[in-house]
Structures are given as C-alpha cells and as structure tokens.
Image (cartoon, grey):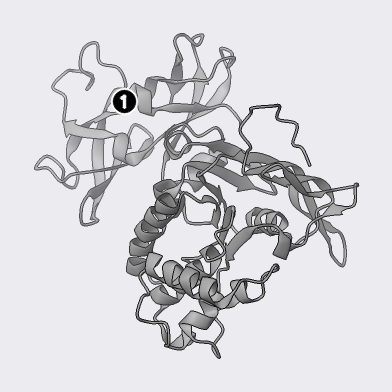
C-alpha cells in the first residue's frame, strides 16, 4: 500500500498520526493516548519519555499491534499497519518488529540458544535449521553472549538476560525495534553500563528504534530525538539538547532534569531572541520565544549547572558595572555530590540552586556573585 510520499521520496520507517486510545473504567473512560503524532527517521533512536500513566507504553503497544486504537493511523515503512475506522489491522507477528519488554520474558525451560531462536522457529515462511543456527550465533555474538548457548536462560545475570532479550529481538533482523523500559530492572551501576552498550549496539546495527522510558538520563544519553509525554499527549518533541536547554513548558523543564524557576514579567519587546524581564531578584535578560508580549507573566527556567558562583562583587550595590544577569547572594548550604558541589544560594527573597566545582570562596554564609548566563535563561510562556 502506497504511503503517498511521492516518487523518489524516502520511506519513513515509522509514522504515527493522530493516535488515540481510551480504556473503559467502572465510572468513566480513561483517555490513555490523545492525538499523538510523530515520525521516526531511518536508523534513529526515538524515545517516548514521561512519568507513569502518561501514555508512552500504550503508544508503543499500539505500534506493536498489541493494542487496538480508536483514532489515527500507524505506518511501518510504506505499509499501513492499522487505521481506525477502516478495518485495517495487521497483527503483531506480521509487523516486522522486534520487541523487548520490561520483564525481558526469558523462558526458564529453554536454553539461551533456544530463547534466541524462538522467533525464527515460529516464523512464516519457515526458516531452515542451518539459517537459524547462523542467525542465532550472529545475534548472540552481537550482544556478547557467545559461549552461553547451552546455559538455561534464567541462569544468566540480569544484564545477560537483558542482552538475551535483545538478541531474540534482533535475530529476525526486524525493520523496527521496540524497547519498553528494558533497563528498569537493573541496579544503578549496571543500568548505566547497559545504556552505553545498548546505544552502541543500536548504532552498529543501524536499526530504527522506538524506546520507552521514564528515566531522563536514559533518554538524554541515548536518543536521537525525544518526545516528552504528559496526560496522553506530546508536550514537546526535539533533540536531547533542545529538550534540556529549551523546554517549551514548565512540565518539561521540571521533568527533564533539575531546574530553577523564577516568576517574571516581560518588560521589553523580544529582540534577536531575547527579552528583558522583571523578577524578584532584579532585572534579567533571557531567551524568549517570539510573540510573547510586553507585560506578560512568564516563568524563567535556568539549570543549576549553568549558574556561576564567583567571589563577591566589590561594587556598592553588589552588581558589577555593565554586568548582565549578575547578582549578589549568600550561600545558605552546600552538599558534596562527588564530582560536583551543590549550593543553595539566597538571592534577595529567592533561593537558587547551583552546581559546580568546589572552590575556596564557597562555604556556609559566604557572599558570592551569582551569574545566570543569558543564553541559559529560558522564558516559558505556558503559564
């Protein structure tokens, strides 16, 4: 079935349009997914990020064919997999996908080889034994499980079981790889190591990947693009850099990382992407979206690691001459976090969090200069 992209146009591996899914409860219907649309480019690592109940796993399950949706269309490549109201529905086993669940789903009565080979043994058309052995050995080698073929699946460690689940997902050489919080059952140190392994494996294989997680560190470190979900819809989509440094909503700024919020009033028209604002700590210059009018009540987000704490200014008002976004503050508390030190600094009536390297001038009750770099102060106008 043609996608309508036009002759010579590249085929998008995954396209989701106006997806809607609801569940019927005892007292009312629950809208799990509400008008979600996105596309995933060839070879991309696309992440659905959000808190529990935001609709990310339901979206993934609709893509996989494990849930029926009430509105919208899902296409894998140039073929419609499902489209509400048309009767088109391709079952999961015919969607050319590989999937890793949160629980891994390793069968305890099967060896590592048998677990990895299962998708090929039930495939239609049938795959001959020689081809099965060759592809299973290739998949196990890819995830560094060569030599474990005869071991029972549940005799592996958590990290090895995760690798086995990946091997089983890629053994069919699927067009699309779906991963539903595959690292959530691992301890913190192993989870960090597996993030690197999984990212490198995906890049080596070049397989288009849709990933679901609530972990911001996973999303930021692994993804090509991120869609932050809230209440069944996409709150913001973009590169990890844009999502983190230029949040479009207060929810995104608060969910993705740690940030400081300053309530502000716009006092100048937006010029060259910046505007002047009045805040409780004084006048601030910040990155501001076009179209935000003067006198608007907005929120400014600034990440703790972007704030610079220097020695106290010697000027009478505590603010260097001609300095922009530099204020006088007092260190209220410090916390050692290993690589960095976290400081809570009182600036006027506001307490600001900053993170950076330890320095001699940083101690309890120290007077410091607080610099909020203009390019790192982002106006959020969704109040």
Frontmost residue, 120 versus 322: 120
Frontmost residue, 212 versus 23: 212
Position of 274 relative to 306 (above/below): above
The image quarter in which residue 145 lies: bottom left
Could you tell me if residue 185 is visible in this image? Answer: no
Horizontal arrangement in the rendering, residue 312 relative to residue 296 (left or right): left
Pick out the residue farthest to the bottom: 109
Image coordinates for residue 218, horizontal then vertical, percent: 43, 54
Frontmost residue, 196 versus 218: 196
Position of 21 relative to 166 (above/below): above
For the image shown, how many numbered marks are present on the structure? 1
Q: Residue at x 15, y 46 (%)?
A: 358
- Where does label 1 land, which residue? 373
The image quarter in which residue 105 lies: bottom right
Callout 1 environment at 10 Å: few (<14), some (14 to 19), or many (20+)?
some
Q: Residue at x 52, y 63 (%)?
A: 170
SS at mark 1 in the image:
loop
In the rendered view of the protein, which quadrant contains the N terminus? top right
Image coordinates for residue 311, horizontal then vertical, percent: 14, 31
Position of 69 relative to 348 (above/below): below
In the rendered view of the protein, which quadrant contains the C terminus? top right
Frontmost residue, 309 versus 176: 176
Image coordinates for residue 120, horizontal then vertical, percent: 60, 72
Image coordinates for residue 294, horizontal then vertical, percent: 56, 12
The image quarter in which residue 227 lies: top right
Position of 249 relative to 373 (above/below): below
Could you tell me if residue 272 is visible in this image? Answer: yes
Q: Residue at x 13, y 22 (%)?
A: 314
């Amino acid at each position: 079935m043609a996608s309508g992209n036009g002759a010579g146009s590249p085929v998008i591996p995954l396209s989701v349009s106006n997806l809607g899914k609801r569940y019927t409860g005892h007292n009312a219907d629950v809208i799990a997914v509400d008008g979600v649309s996105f596309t995933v480019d060839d070879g991309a690592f696309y992440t659905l990020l959000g808190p529990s109940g935001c609709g990310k796993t339901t979206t993934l399950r609709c893509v996989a064919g494990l849930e029926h949706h009430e509105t919208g269309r899902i296409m894998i490549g140039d073929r419609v997999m499902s489209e509400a109201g048309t009767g088109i529905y391709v079952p999961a086993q015919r969607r050319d996908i590989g999937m890793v669940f949160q629980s891994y789903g390793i069968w305890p009565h099967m060896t590592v080889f048998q677990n990895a080979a299962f998708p090929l043994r039930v495939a239609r058309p049938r795959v001959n034994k020689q081809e099965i052995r060759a592809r299973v050995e290739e998949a196990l080698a890819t995830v560094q499980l060569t030599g474990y073929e005869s071991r029972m699946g549940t005799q592996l460690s958590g990290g090895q079981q995760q690798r086995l689940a990946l091997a089983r997902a890629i053994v069919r050489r699927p067009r699309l790889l779906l991963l539903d919080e595959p690292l959530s059952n691992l301890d913190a140190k192993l989870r960090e190591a597996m993030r690197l392994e999984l990212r490198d494996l995906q890049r080596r294989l070049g397989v288009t990947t849709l990933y679901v997680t609530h972990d911001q560190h996973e999303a930021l470190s692994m993804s090509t693009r991120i869609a932050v979900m809230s209440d069944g819809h996409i709150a913001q989509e973009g590169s990890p850099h844009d999502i983190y440094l230029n949040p479009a909503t207060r929810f995104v700024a608060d969910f993705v990382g740690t940030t400081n919020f300053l309530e502000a009033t716009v006092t100048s028209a937006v010029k060259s992407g910046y505007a002047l604002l009045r805040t409780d700590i004084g006048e601030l210059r910040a990155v501001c979206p076009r179209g935000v009018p003067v006198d608007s009540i907005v929120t400014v987000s600034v990440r703790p690691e972007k704030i610079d704490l220097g020695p106290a200014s010697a000027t009478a008002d505590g603010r260097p001459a001609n300095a922009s976004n530099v204020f006088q503050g007092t260190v209220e508390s410090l916390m050692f976090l290993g690589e960095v030190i976290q400081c809570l600094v009182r600036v006027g009536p506001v307490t600001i969090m900053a993170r950076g390297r330890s320095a001699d001038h940083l101690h309890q009750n120290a007077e410091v200069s607080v610099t909020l770099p203009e390019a790192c102060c982002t106006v959020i106008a969704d109040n």
